[in-house]
Image (cartoon, helix red, strand yellow):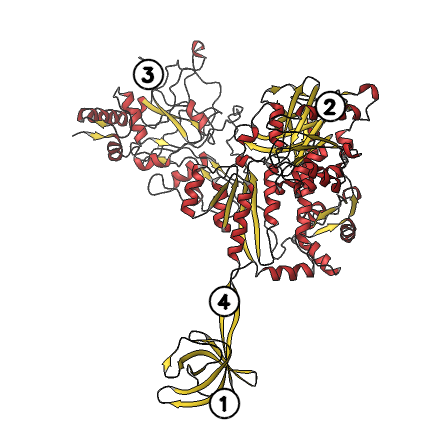
Amino acid sequence: MAKRVYELAKELGLDSKEILSRLRDLQIQVKSHMSLLEPAEVEKLKNSLAQEAAAPSLSATVEKRVKSNVIRRRTLKAEPPLEGAAPATLPPPSAEEKPAAKKAPLKKAGVKKTGKAAAAPAPEQEPEKKPEPPRVKAAPSPEPAPPPAAEAAPEPEAAKAPPKRARAGRPYLKPSIRRTARAVDNIPLPEAKPLKPSEKVVPPPSPSKKKKGKPLAALAEEEEKAPGRPGKKKGKGEFPAKKKGLRRKIAFKSYLGGDGIELLGAERMYTPARKKKGPGKKPAPKKTKVTVPKPSKRIVHMGETINLPDLAKRMGIKAGQLVEKLTAMGHAAGSENQLDYEMASLLAAEFQFEAVKTTFEEAKILMFPTPDRPEELKPRPPVVTVMGHVDHGKTSLLDYVRKTRVAEKEAGQITQHIGASVVDIPAGRIVFVDTPGHEAFTAMRARGAKVTDIVILVVAADDGIMPQTREAASHAKAAEVPIIVAINKVDLPGADPDRVMQKLGELGLTPEEWGGTTMVVKCSAKTGQGVEDLLEGILLQAEVMELRANPDKKAKGVILESRLDRGKGPVSAVLIQEGTLRVGDAIVCGASAGKVRALIDDQGRPQREVGPSLPAEVLGLDGLPMAGDTLLAVAEERKAKLVSEHRAEEMRQRGMAGLSKISLEDFLRQAQQEEVRQLNVILKADTQGSLEAIKQAVEKLNTEQTKIQVIHDGVGGITENDVLLASAGQAVILGFMVRPESSAVKVAEHQDVEIKLYQIIYNLLDEMKAALKGMLKPVTREKVLGHAEVRNLFNVTKVGTVAGSYVTDGSIPRSARVRLLRDQVVVHDGKIASLRRFKDDAREVATGSECGVALENYNDIHLGDVIEAYAIEVVPPA
């Protein structure tokens, strides 16, 4: 019956690895301990093991440690004795074979036997020296081991070289012996000098006097003297028990095989015990050393303000200590308190620190250029901003000039973004900036007035001066730029340019025709009438202004608009005011910085550089700048990053300062606002300018009873995170000129979040107004219907007291509520149980009529009382 390798190893009491090794030596193919062995192969292995057990001297197994956990065993055959050699006793061991020999010498020497032993033949000679060999451990037998021969045969001169001896091997042992005989390590021993005959072998002294190991010879003597089982040690020869301060590692036990083969080897490794300390003399615990920084390290640098955790971190102390100190100084303290320089200095002085106010000088880092010399200035095209009321034809006028149809593509045919374009005409080049006219885009119009050289105020001839017209004129005057008035739509039947010119005088814009200084051009964006005159007037005004700039220095511009593109990242529309912006320049803009990766002109064409007064889209910023921020080109990107990080930190500090400061009035106001109905919204828009305009317009809709709270706003499409935030904050998502992602739509349906999308801003604002109005509580109002005087009383069975009354004014309806007044004091308020005119039921009794009135669940009616009828009306909120 076939057996597996591990079953055979268990049966024989051997390790599976050793069985595998022996099988491979016998040319039996096996792979692992799970391999199957045929009966013939099992028999072959057993025969091999039996032969090794019968003739242990002819073979030996040598162990060699390859790694800490790997021992390599090899079975070697000893050389047979030479023919004709007389049997001789074992030669006495040399000085190298001392009793304390370890495993390294055992590899060189053969296995010692007390029975038959093969020795190399040698002629009989008298030895020069007779060293007295140490006694060795004898085989387990009742007879003592024979003493060594008195005279050993000397070797011939031809055989002076050491003969080739068989390497010591280990015979097949019993399982119990094989489990305990494990080699631990090989330690090379120094070569010893040969002993003189008179000298005795004395074991080396142990490092410890109290606990010292014995040499192998001494162990052998003790075992030899000890009666009992072979291999059983007693006294000091036994394995010592574990004691404190002493570690022993036994490499070999001294065992005696069943076949009379002696394995003797022991290795003891120990460390001296630690010195015991006297009782009760425990070392005192070390105290924490309080280190004080040197004076140069006790300086805290700060700006205008610093929050409390930052101050604590810079001083290397806990924030709680600062809070305690502030409280002790009589100041309200919190973990996020903003401290000014004076308070921070006092607080730092309490801890032996000095607060130093440092200012971040951007001018030194950015290295603003010196004023331009006249010879460096070159002519530049004028920047013209078109402003006016909504739907007065601003974009249509530009479309005629640019030969485009932008107005037709706008949602609702109204402009809702600020944009710049370049127009080349035979007389020169003009840069137009188109601004929206809706009242919500006030900030855009103000931004356009700041970056422009000339303002064109467009007024519809049939509509006249409107609120946004007045506002645009105010922005232009605040920016101190000249104004050219374009009276548009003069081709319409209801056009009245003279009335418009008369109204312009109220704004301080007196036409040149009437003796003023304002250029007024009558034109039509539909027919083109007067457009050429308008362009000539622009170039004439620009020539008078002598517009010049230096294109050979670092660029400076202003952000008109910024948006987030899915493929391009942050995209910013910039108008260059000075210098030239090139691809690869390091730029800083507000709290954003980066390197220009691409420049795209108003026609969508990539450009290598953009000069003064020209617009372009810039790619490469690491964030979205705010519309109106100044863009600066710097020498190194490192400096740009430094400035942007400082600005971001300042913004964060200002935000935290605004949150931490609160007065009693603010607290009372917040307590009152807890009763205000609030609508939470999330705003998402396509550009930064539109987002800013919508946010400001929505916040203007707040009233004392209702409030719109913008919990989050951003540029770009509506994402899944926006929906999850709206679900957590119970908010409505408002999207302007953007669309939600498909995943966001699925999440919104699952979370029951409402997403409202708009293309026109006034639709968004109208719906927000309606939503706020719907949030208002209904207003109830009381309306008095009439009065009746009680002139008689009747007691009716099952009805109660009936008041005979006369209606003095108004009417008394059956369904009305009534009050019973006695001496102008309300004594009862309830409903009418019965109303009769003579003996018939009546639904209403008019003025000057008599009636009988019974009140519901009330009979205490007196003569002279007055019954007042009234109704409750619900008035919709204003």
Lower position in the chain sequence, tag 1 or tag 3: 3
Q: Secondary structure at mark 4?
A: strand
Lower position in the chain sequence, tag 3 or tag 2: 3
- At x 43% / y 47%, what residue is drawn? 751
Verify CB contact (< 8 Å) between mark 3 and mark 2.
no
How far apart marks 1 and 4 lie (CA) works out to 31 Å
Asked if residue 190 is positioned above or below residue 825 in the image, the reply reads above
Asked if residue 795 is positioned above or below residue 522 in the image, the reply reads below
Instruction: Return the residue found at the far left.
Output: 1
Other-residue count near label 3 (Cα within 10 Å), few / some / many at <14 / 14–19 / ≥20 = some
Q: Secondary structure at mark 3?
A: loop
Residue bearing mark 1: 863
Q: Is residue 489 left or right of residue 16?
A: right
Q: Which mark is residue 539?
A: 2
Nearer-the-camera pick, 144 or 393: 393
How far apart marks 2 and 4 lie (CA) works out to 66 Å
Residue bearing mark 4: 873
Q: Is residue 743 left or right of residue 60?
A: right
Other-residue count near label 2 (Cα within 10 Å), few / some / many at <14 / 14–19 / ≥20 = some
Residue bearing mark 3: 81
Q: Residue 94: image x %, image y %? A: 47, 24
Other-residue count near label 1 (Cα within 10 Å), few / some / many at <14 / 14–19 / ≥20 = some
Image quadrant containing the N terminus: top left
